Image (tube, rainbow, N blue to C red):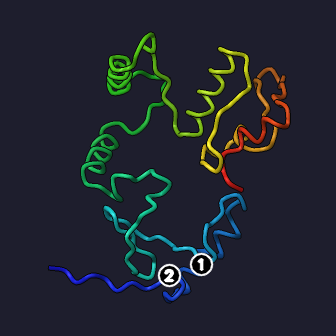
Amino acid sequence: MTTPAQFVPASQLARSARSEEAVAKHKKYLWPSVTNYFQQPLVADRGEMQHLWDVEGNKYLDFFGGILTVSVGHCNPKITSKVNAQVNRLQHTSTLYPNQHIVALAEKIAQITPGNLQQSFFTNSGTEANEAAILLARMSTGSYDVVALRHAYSGGSALFSRRPVLTGSVSSSRFSRIEPPASEYAAALCARR
């Protein structure tokens, strides 16, 4: 039987010079849009399943999971063993070259998706996936309408901000400005500012 950890509010935890230095350098070297949610942010050092440790060695029960990106736990052995095996075999080739794994995944997705959804487009992030989906919907419908949840996070691109989006080709040096009516900016703005 283990003894439950004593709860100590984060504001009462001692912060080391190491932690203060990391926070100061974060402010100095990262863009202001890469913001912290707290006045005294936790400076994470390592994680193991549902726990996270800061640079001072304090252990936390992580209810946040890195914006849902580690919903299976930090350094989950089932996941890290598969990642390590793949990285040790073939780390990156881009989509310029086919490989058996990307083809197998696309085939499996085609088998389980309804209707004529038989081809996949793999992206690097949720932001890219959202942008691709919206661009495909615009091409298909001609509409700029987007249904989004207020205060939900949908990426950090210009598409989800109040700034107009530029599209075009660098090689042609021709860009067109996609600027829907101002009322639609609010609909596309999903990340709380």
Q: Is residue 4 above or below residue 35?
A: below
Q: Nearer the viewer, residue 2 or 147?
A: 147
Residue at 71% x, 44% y: name it: 189
Query: Residue at image x 33%, y 27%?
Result: 101
The quadrant of the picture occupied by the N terminus is bottom left
Q: Residue 88: percent from the left, percent from the top?
A: 30, 43
Q: Are marks 2 and 1 in contact (CB under 8 Å)?
A: yes
**CA separation in Å, label 2 and label 1:** 8 Å
Residue 106 is situated, as x and y percent measured from the top left of the image, at 38, 22
Bin the neighbour count of mark 1 within 10 Å (Cα to Cα): few under 14, some 14-19, many 20 and up: few
* Residue 188 placement, left or right of 93: right
Judging by the rendered image, the residue that carries numbered circle 2 is 10
Q: Amino acid at mark 1?
A: Gln
Image location (x, y in percent) of residue 51: 35, 68
Q: Would you call the spot at circle 2 few (<14 residues within 10 Å), some (14-19), or many (20 or more)?
A: few
Label 2 sits on what residue type?
A: Ala
Name the N-terminal-most of marks 2 and 1. Answer: 2
Q: Quadrant of the C terminus?
A: bottom right
Query: Quadrant location of residue 138?
Result: top right
The residue that appears at 35% across and 25% down in the rendered structure is: 105
Name the foreground residue: 120 vs 68.
Answer: 68
- Give the vertical position of 120 relative to 83 (above or below): above
For the residue pair 100 and 72, the one nearer the viewer reads as: 72
The residue sitting at 22% across, 84% down in the picture is 3
Q: Relative to 81, is 52 above or below?
A: below
Q: Secondary structure at mark 1?
A: loop
Residue 162, horizontal then vertical, whole percent: 79, 44
Q: Is residue 115 left or right of residue 50?
A: right
> What residue is pinned by disc 1?
40
